[in-house]
Image: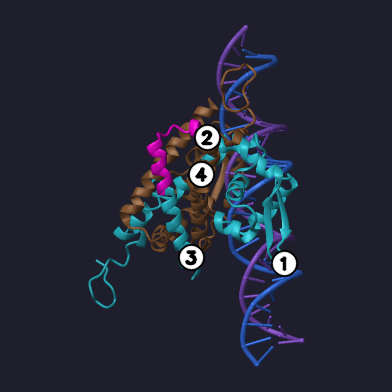
Chain colours: A cyan, B brown, C blue, D purple
Amino acid sequence: MARARSGVAVVPAVKPANTTRAARARIEALQLSRQLCFPLYAAGNLLGRLYRPLLDAIGLTYPQYLVMLALWERDARSVGELGETLFLDSGTLSPLLKRLEQAGLVQRRRAIDDERRVVVALTAQGLALRDRAADVPEAMLCRIPLKGSELAGHREKMWSLLHTLQQAAADIAD
Amino acid sequence: MARARSGVAVVPAVKPANTTRAARARIEALQLSRQLCFPLYAAGNLLGRLYRPLLDAIGLTYPQYLVMLALWERDARSVGELGETLFLDSGTLSPLLKRLEQAGLVQRRRAIDDERRVVVALTAQGLALRDRAADVPEAMLCRIPLKGSELAGHREKMWSLLHTLQQAAADIAD
DNA sequence: CGCAATTGTATTGCACGCAATATAATCGGG
DNA sequence: CCCGATTATATTGCGTGCAATACAATTGCG
């Protein structure tokens, strides 16, 4: 049996590293069914697909819908505030907001007190769209076979996970 | 007080539709904090951002990592089978698989028995990458402040939600 | 066997999502 | 008051996601 040069009895040196017990455990942790990230990723994609036909009817994409939800809740916000609310940066929001402006739903103007900031505000048309969007949540619930309590459970878990991940991202950023 | 032309007492006709009790309830259902879709969407984005530095080290994007996980689990699968596993279609997978082939991690070849199908198989390099990827799950767990039980709870909820949404999507498709 | 319908991928076009970079406005120390 | 550092947004480049479309291989019906 092979031995380390020191003479101390250790794991056989000729044994490939990926056949140790610990290495096998790490390999097994790569199974799709053991991931948290995969069902989260796939469920997000599926939800987007389920929303699409409903949002097509009011001329919005899924991220655009989220921006409108944010503005209906609190109007006249800067790009940065919207990004903080939705966890998106200017690279995503700038072109998206331009498309919403092209569609006549929002207006973008520089803040008077600080010309670096761009304030996004609803137009009359953007505000009016809320009445048509008001049918969307109910229509989605009809499409998803979940009891009210299950839905609430999922929602609570998702918000909890979101806050945990947000904390993790903040910690990495130092 | 205004009345309907029929003379039957109804909700005042002059009252705007969006001030009825039911309409207010639908409007309130548009709040971001009441959504399931939003934390799911945002958590997916955040997870991708947390994975990125780890996956950069082995030259993969997040969706590419998922494809490799699928292939490490079961090699030599058609594009359609991979799509079914990962809930993605050829429009996403075709260019992604080409990039994996360019990187020397997989080989794509037409099936002998049915030339419509493209079989994706790991190269020696692609198989070898698994050993380096084996550190990723543990590194992610270190970054996310979750107890093992919490993690398992989230994972179970996410898989449950994924299956529910998959059912909903299948029902829509008829 | 012939041919229309079906199946499996690829391609196209558009909209994200984000790192890296650029640019303009503001702030702050000297 | 000036100039370097900081802040807020925009732009660029690349890689997804996905509907719509195209196309080749296969199937199935007469």
Q: CA distance from mark 1 to mark 4?
A: 34 Å
Q: CA distance from mark 4 to mark 3?
A: 22 Å
Q: CA distance from mark 3 to mark 1?
A: 28 Å
Give the residue at mark 4.
B37
Magenta residues (range): A141-157
Q: Secondary structure at mark 2?
A: helix
Give the residue at mark 1.
A115
Q: The disc labelled 1 sits on which kind of residue?
A: Glu
Residue A110 falls in image quadrant: bottom right
Q: Decide: is B168 above or below B153.
A: above
> Looking at the rendered structure, which numbered label has been put on residue A170?
3
Q: Residue furthest left?
A: A9
Give the residue at mark 2.
B21
Check if residue A142 falls in the magenta segment.
yes
Of the two numbered discs 1 and 4 in the rendering, the one whose residue sits closer to the viewer: 1
| B3 relative position to A15: left or right | right
